[in-house]
Image (spheres, helix red, strand yellow):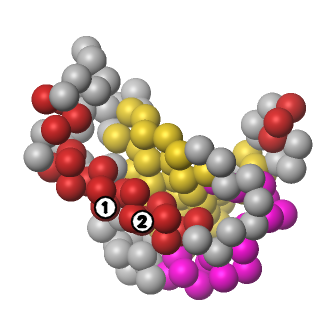
Amino acid sequence: MIDVLAVTLEGHLAVLELKADEDIHLPLQGVDYWSRVDWHHRRGEFQRFGYFPGRELSPDPPLLLLVAPALHIHPATDTLLRYISPEIDWTLMGIDERWRDGVRVIFRKHADPQSEGRSQGLPA
């Protein structure tokens, strides 16, 4: 699938790692892309090179959104997410299997800022 770099309404950069099928690399690829985006962001390169014209970017680190069909999230994903640095504000989103007909979030799981790498599951 494709990966996306976006900006939220609040000006936060958001790295979206998207998968259409089960893939153990989902969190690892997301962290890899996040670290590259964070590196460029800290140097002000997105603004300097004309990305997101007319938008003021937040100085905060980017958000990381990991998205896959809910029934096709690799079983090892939860384990891998426990080892992601607490510096990374990540969200895992399981979407409806019929995402080609319209995207509907089935569940969200967020990094728990209180507990170094553990997560908290939230309903969509």
Which label number is shown at residue 44?
none
Residue 53 covered by magenta stretch: no
In the image, is 60 to the left or to the right of 105? left
The location of residue 93, given as percent across then percent down, is 65, 55
Q: Position of residue 40 (x, y in %)?
A: 20, 48
Residue at (76% x, 37% y) in the render: 103
Q: Residue at x 11, y 46 (%)?
A: 43
The one nearer the camera, 118 or 20, is 20
Q: Residue furthest top?
A: 54
Residue shown at the point (82%, 36%) measured from the top left: 100
Q: Residues within 10 Å of mark 2 (few under 14, many from 20)?
A: many
Q: Taking the image as drawn, is residue 107 in sight? A: no
Question: Residue under circle 1?
Answer: 35
> Residue at coordinates 80% horizontally, 64% vertically from top-left?
72
Quote the CA–CA distance across marks 2 and 1: 6 Å
Q: Which residues are magenta?
A: 67-82
Query: Relative to residue 76, is residue 91 depicted above or below?
Result: above
Q: How crowded is the residue under tag 1: few (<14 C-alpha within 10 Å), some, or many (20+)?
A: some
Q: How many marks?
A: 2
Q: Amino acid at mark 2?
A: Val
As helix, strand or loop, the secondary structure at mark 2 comes to helix
* Residue 31 badge: 2
Q: Are marks 2 and 1 in contact (CB under 8 Å)?
A: yes
- Give the image location of residue 124, x and y in percent: 71, 49
Drawn side of residue 108 relative to residue 82, left or right: right
Question: Which secondary structure, mark 1?
Answer: helix
* Image spot of residue 85 (x, y percent): 35, 75
- Rendered image quadrant of residue 19: bottom right
Vertical side of 57 occupied by 28: above or below: below
Q: Magenta span has 76?
A: yes
Q: Is residue 84 visible?
A: yes
Question: What residue type is disc 1 on?
Answer: Ser
